[in-house]
Amino acid sequence: MIVLFTDFGTGSPYLGQMKGAIWREHPGALVVDLLAEAPAFDPRVSAYLLAAYPQDFPEGTVFLAVVDPGVGDPARRPAVVRVDGRWFVGPDNGLFNVVARRGHEVAWWDLTWRPARLSASFHGRDLFAPVAARLDRGEPPPGEPVDPGRRIDRSWPEELAQVIYVDAFGNCFTGLRAAALSAQAVVEVGGRRLRRARTFHEVPPGEPFWYENANGLVELAANRARCDRLLGIGPGAPVRILEGEP
């Protein structure tokens, strides 16, 4: 299958155009809409969100991931990355940095293939979608293999201590993996200190808390309320970890 991860939003023709490009190359492809509201213009933050999802999909899955504010810049390389049996296609602008750093078996290609029509501003449709379709058909990456060590930036923090995404319920995902925190950890955000709960019913209505969400991230939430509005926070809000403090 091909999984779409973009910052395109759903109120535009862009996702449909990418799907059209996929099906033109591979009419039998199964396409899954994972996320169209990745942190806009921010491949670095989006990288921490993208890295939370591959384990939900089988080996062989192709992630077509496009958060590409530098599209058209010749310094921004297009890439194919294979991490633990799953493919990632998109811009080499940091978007694949976290998933590659956390992988056990990593291979990297600089894409050298170019389509006959390559617009200046929509490489998601013209370049990345056809390549994703060909990978899904079982073809090799149309590019030059490079040492992943030349592309992975290890200066990034292992965990990103900030809010990276707010869902439709006002729950705030952070770039922290819950496994990196103790059960007694307190999360300080928006001027409040939040304790851990296992799930929503363990706290009174309207009370904010943190918990390990279904994708293993530290998520800030409130029982039957929007945590983002309650705390006055959104994407980019910093979080601080206090081990066991009241």
Image: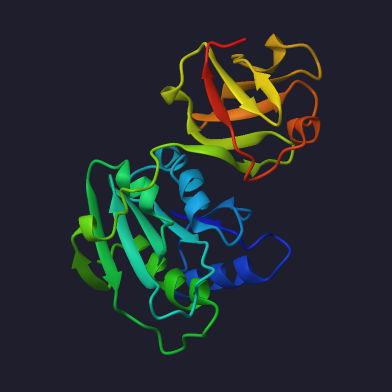
Q: Residue at x 20, y 65 (%)?
A: 146
Q: Name above or below for residue 153 compared with residue 171.
A: below
The answer to whether residue 141 of the structure is visible from this angle is no
Residue extending farthest bottom: 116
Residue 40: % across, % down: 61, 59
Is residue 56 found left or right of 148 in the rendered image? right
Is residue 171 found left or right of 81 in the rendered image? right
Please state the total of marks drawn on the protein image.
0
Residue 121: % across, % down: 55, 80
Is residue 8 found left or right of 133 in the rendered image? right
Q: Residue at x 60, y 53 (%)?
A: 39
Q: Nearer the viewer, residue 8 or 87?
A: 8
The quadrant in which the C terminus is found is top right
Residue 76 falls in which quadrant of the image? Answer: bottom left
The quadrant in which the N terminus is found is bottom left
Q: Nearer the viewer, residue 18 or 66?
A: 66
Q: Name above or below for residue 19 compared with residue 228.
A: below
- The colour scheme applied to this rendered structure is rainbow
Residue 184: % across, % down: 52, 11
Q: Name above or below for residue 75 compared with residue 106.
A: below
Q: Residue at x 72, y 38 (%)?
A: 233
Q: Name above or below for residue 183 compared with residue 137.
A: above
Residue 107: % across, % down: 23, 55
Residue 131 falls in which quadrant of the image? Answer: bottom left
The answer to whether residue 148 of the structure is visible from this angle is yes
